[in-house]
Image (cartoon, helix red, strand yellow):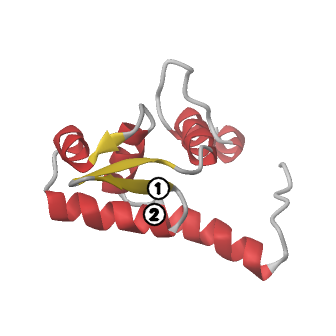
Amino acid sequence: MEAVNLPTDGQDLSKISTVMQAISHPMRLKIIGALGRGEKIVTHIMEEVGSSQSNVSQHVEVLRKAGIVQSRRDHNRIYCSIADLNVLTLLTKVRECYCNTQHGMRTSRRAQMVG
């Protein structure tokens, strides 16, 4: 089994925890997916993820506070984009590990040992 080398510094652990909590909601994952394809106004995010303006705004705010998403205002429109591209790398890796994708589903070592 591979050893996990997590930081021992409380500040680093807090940052990891904040990011993991922020991306742990299905709607926020949808929003990240939409923004992973480029900057969008909130209205376009709403259409893409199939949710209301207030719901999308609340989830965008959680992602913004975690440093994952950034927003900017241009007249009466709010544009959102990914602020931390590392989250896209992380989610791509999670998808490869846990989803049946074109890259193939990986079996966990625990499942390999049991089977």
- Type of amino acid at the residue the image marks with label 1: Gln
Q: Nearer the viewer, residue 75 or 90?
A: 75
Q: Secondary structure at mark 1?
A: strand
* Outermost residue, left side: 52
At 81% across and 64% down in the image, what residue appears?
6
At 25% across and 58% down in the image, what residue appears?
56
Residue 74 to residue 37: above or below: below
Residue 15 to residue 3: above or below: below
- Image coordinates of residue 91 in percent, x first then y, are 54, 43
Q: Which residue is mark 2?
A: 64
Q: Quadrant of residue 54?
A: bottom left
Q: Nearer the viewer, residue 79 or 110?
A: 79
Contact flag, marks 1 and 2 (Cβ < 8 Å): yes
- Image coordinates of residue 7 in percent, x first then y, are 83, 68
Q: Quadrant of residue 89?
A: top right
Circle 2: is it few (<14), some (14-19), or many (20+) Cα within 10 Å?
some
Left or right: residue 14 compared with residue 60? right
* Outermost residue, bottom side: 10
At 57% across and 42% down in the image, what residue appears?
94
The total number of labels drawn is 2
Q: Which residue is mark 1?
A: 70
Q: Which mark is residue 36?
A: none
Left or right: residue 77 compared with residue 106? left
Q: Quadrant of residue 44?
A: top left
- Image coordinates of residue 102 in percent, x first then y, are 49, 18
